[in-house]
Image (tube, helix red, strand yellow):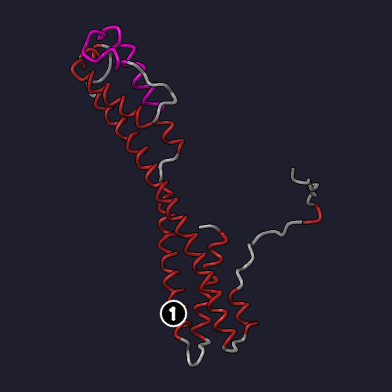
Amino acid sequence: MQDRQVRTLKMIRSIVVHLEKHPVQPEPPLLTEMCGSFKESMTRISALWQEQRSQLDIPTAYDVAKMRTKLRRERLMPLVRIAKPLLRFAPGAEGMLRVPHARTNTVTLANHALDVAKLLTPHITLFVRAGHAKTLLEELKREAQTLANAASYTDKRRKQKARATLALSREFKKAMGMVMVTEGILMSHGADMREWRGVRRVEAKQGRPKDRSKRRKTPQVMPQ
């Protein structure tokens, strides 16, 4: 959630407290509805905020890049160099015994590694003779599947975060509309508007004030 949204949420909470401490008598049904809507909105905003924050465990681009590099350079490249000359006549070897380009889609790279592992499994003895462990191809499968899962998971969670961010924006926009309606009701019932304006004011962003006198002026240019 953005800093402005955090301060706006604080303002909405202040409005609810103000309405409960300074009720309009008799209370208009629409004002009662607005107060309830503010509370519902705060609940939705909190839930969406948690959904946003839950995305922080998404594997980073750096993590995925490291896994890609290891799979290509440390796993596939040595295997292909050993197998291609010796297994070139094996069924399916001609098109499979290659290393995908460095810019190949992550899921495509992972799936190719899984196919290579499947192709080479009957020939594990060859790699044992070359000094590799018997678990070599099982490790290749595991790393390829981990990479595929990371790519799929990252894409899915990023989409979820984008949806939560959009929903948050819409919820705040809706809440600000309710603030306007509430203000209109209070004005028409003779409420203390000076106090109300203090309650509905969004706090200023904290930090050192900018020295506007030193800001460079950009010459205005007529649009073409």
Residue 221 is left or right of residue 129, and the answer is: right
Seen from the viewer's position, the closer of residues 119 and 27 is: 27
Residue 54 rendering spot, x and y as whole percentages: 40, 53
Q: Residue furthest bottom?
A: 26
Q: In this figure, what is the number of numbered marks?
A: 1
**Eyeballing the image, is 157 above or below 193?**
above
Q: Residue furthest front?
A: 224
Q: Which residue is mark 1?
A: 33
Answer above or below: position of 182 versus 87: below
Q: Identify the image quadrant of residue 197.
A: bottom right
Left or right side of 188 for 104: left
Whether residue 145 is visible here, answered yes or no, is yes
Please provide percent x and percent y for residue 172: 50, 64
Q: Residues within 10 Å of mark 1 (few under 14, many from 20)?
A: few
The answer to whether 134 is drawn above or below residue 83 in the figure is below
Point out the image quarter for the C terminus: top right
154 over 171 or under it: above or below: above
Q: Residue visible at 24% across and 11% down?
A: 129
The percent coordinates of residue 86 (x first, y second) are 26, 7
Q: Nearer the viewer, residue 166 or 93?
A: 166
Disc 1 secondary structure class: helix
Residue 169: x %, y % from top left: 50, 59
Q: Residue at x 42, y 53 (%)?
A: 163
Q: Main secondary structure of the magenta part?
A: helix
Q: What stretch of residues is rendered in magenta? A: 68-97
Q: Amino acid at mark 1?
A: Glu
Does residue 194 show up magenta in the picture?
A: no
Q: Nearer the viewer, residue 43 or 78?
A: 43
Does the magenta portion include 81? yes
Q: Residue at x 47, y 60 (%)?
A: 168
Q: Is any part of residue 136 visible from this angle?
A: no
Residue 180 position by quadrant: bottom right
